[in-house]
Amino acid sequence: MTTLHSKYTDFEALREQAITLRREGLSRRRIRDRLHIDNNDILNRLLEGEPPPKWTKRPNAKDDLRTKARELRLKGLTYDQIQLELGCSKSSISRWVRDLPKPARREPKEQAELAARKRWDHELAVRDEERQRTKAGAAAEIGTMSERELFMAGVTLYWAEGTKDKPYDRRESLLFINSDPNVIKLYLRWLELLEVPRERMHFRVSIHESADVPEAERFWADLTGVDLADFKKATLKKHNPKTTRKNIGGTYRGCLIVYVTKSADLYRRVEGAWYGIVLGANSTPQRNARFGQCRSPVV
């Protein structure tokens, strides 16, 4: 203390100035420069007991998790339960809530259920990883499609989802409806392959009347690259109170109808190509497995 007073004769006055500057929001460096203090130990003594301003505290990515962990602990949840809820480590949870009262000891049945849930969550994670790996591998196998492959994929897609001609209801024109954005993109790429000009394509949204129709139309317009003003008036489906709809929420955008004008001849070619695919499939050698050896068809 003697050494301190030898340079800073009025310590209390200097401390008062330092605290005032700190409360005004100055950083330690600015206070040191303002008061001409060249020793961090002395600066620490001057600011002892004075909390730093809020702006100097760096944001912590785990602050929200810590708050939620404490809330859950106060509700009586155990470390295991909090871990399942938040996905953070038990060591972190322990640091965050160690000052809070411990919940009542769990019953053996509850402990067994929690352990079973942890095992099942792990099993689901493993299954999902395998599922995604299989899908990614299958997608990679396709690679770039030839025009012939795209043509046959489009014909098959249309025959599954498009409107077909019936002896009792003649509809020799291309009319396609689907709710899957990827299916719509493939279908439009197929029409492009068939050299169908965009001016012969008419677009219309089919959707439940209770949905956000303008938002759905904007979504499909962005997806197709068609001006929203060129969309035909949406077809609204009446709600049946006796049924429970599952296709609701922010991701529900109804279906998109794509109608091609002057397409009777094109429809006939598609129908003929479809039956050609059927006949061709019947003459294709069978395989025992996905990558197995070919064997001759059974006679």
Image (cartoon, rainbow, N blue to C red):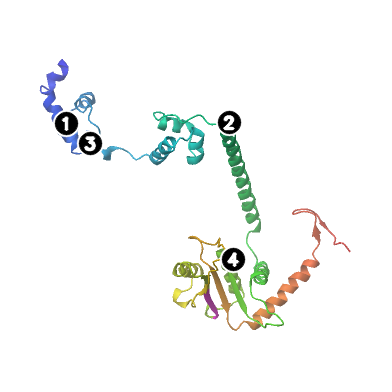
Q: Earlier in the sequence, mark 2 or mark 3?
A: 3
Alpha carbon distance from label 4 to label 2 = 51 Å
- Mark 4 belongs to which amino acid? Val
Alpha carbon distance from label 1 to label 4 = 68 Å
Please provide the residue range marked out in magenta. 200-204
| Residue wearing tag 2 | 108
Q: Which of marks 1 and 2 is nearer the N terminus?
A: 1
Magenta stretch: residue 70 in it? no
Q: Earlier in the sequence, mark 4 or mark 3?
A: 3
Residue 84: x and y, percent?
Answer: 51, 39
Residue at the spot x=63%, y=55% of the render?
140
Q: Which of marks 2 and 3 is in front?
A: 2
| Residue wearing tag 3 | 27
Residue at the spot x=81%, y=62% of the render?
285
Numbered label attached to residue 183: 4
Q: Judge the density around disc 4: few (<14), some (14-19), many (≥20) Cα neighbours within 10 Å.
A: some
Callout 4 secondary element:
helix
Residue 74: x and y, percent?
Answer: 41, 35
55 on left or right of 172: left
| Residue wearing tag 1 | 18
Residue 41: x and y, percent?
Answer: 23, 24
Mainly helix, strand or loop, the magenta region?
A: strand
State the residue in front, 218 or 226. 218
State the residue in front, 13 or 94. 94
Callout 1 secondary element:
helix
Residue at the spot x=34%, y=40% of the render?
59
- Mark 3 belongs to which amino acid? Ser
Image quadrant where one finds the C terminus: bottom right
